[in-house]
Amino acid sequence: MPKMKTKSGAKKRFRVTASGKISGSAAFLSHNLRRRSQKMKRQARGTMILHDADARIVRKFLPYA
């Protein structure tokens, strides 16, 4: 069997933590920021752990992670 390919967009955007969870940066930070509250922008600065439904999708893109 040939090796499975990793989605190159996913390997640039997501990392797998030591406990096996998927971490990535927060969404909705590229434009229209005047509408968003300062609290939302401040909390979305770092990385966050993806929810289970999103992590299941990303896991398929990273077969060897």
Image: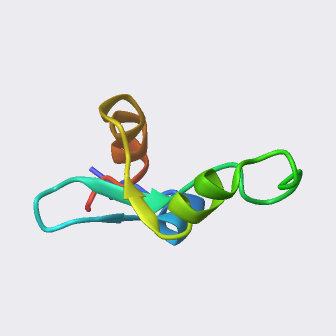
Residue 50 visible somewhere in the drawing: yes
Residue farthest to the left, as pictured = 19
Residue 25 x/y as whole percent:
52, 62
Q: Quadrant of residue 14?
A: bottom left
Above or below: residue 49 compared with residue 55: below
Quadrant for residue 33, please give it. Answer: bottom right
Image point 61% across, 51% down: which residue? Answer: 40
Q: How many numbered marks appear?
A: 0
x, y percentage for residue 38?
68, 58
Left or right: 11 in relation to 35: left
The x, y position of residue 51, in whole percent, is: 35, 37
Question: Residue 6, can we see it?
Answer: no
Residue farthest to the front? 38
- 11 in relation to 37, above or below: below
The residue nearer to you, when weighing 29 against 60, is 29
The C terminus is located in which quarter? bottom left
Identify which residue, 16 or 42, lies in the foreground. Answer: 42
Q: Would residue 29 be found to the left or right of residue 44 on screen?
A: right
> Residue 57 versus residue 27: which sits nearer the camera?
27
Judging from the image, the colouring scheme is rainbow
Task: Give left or right: position of 53 versus 36.
Answer: left
Name the residue: 79% across, 60% down: 30
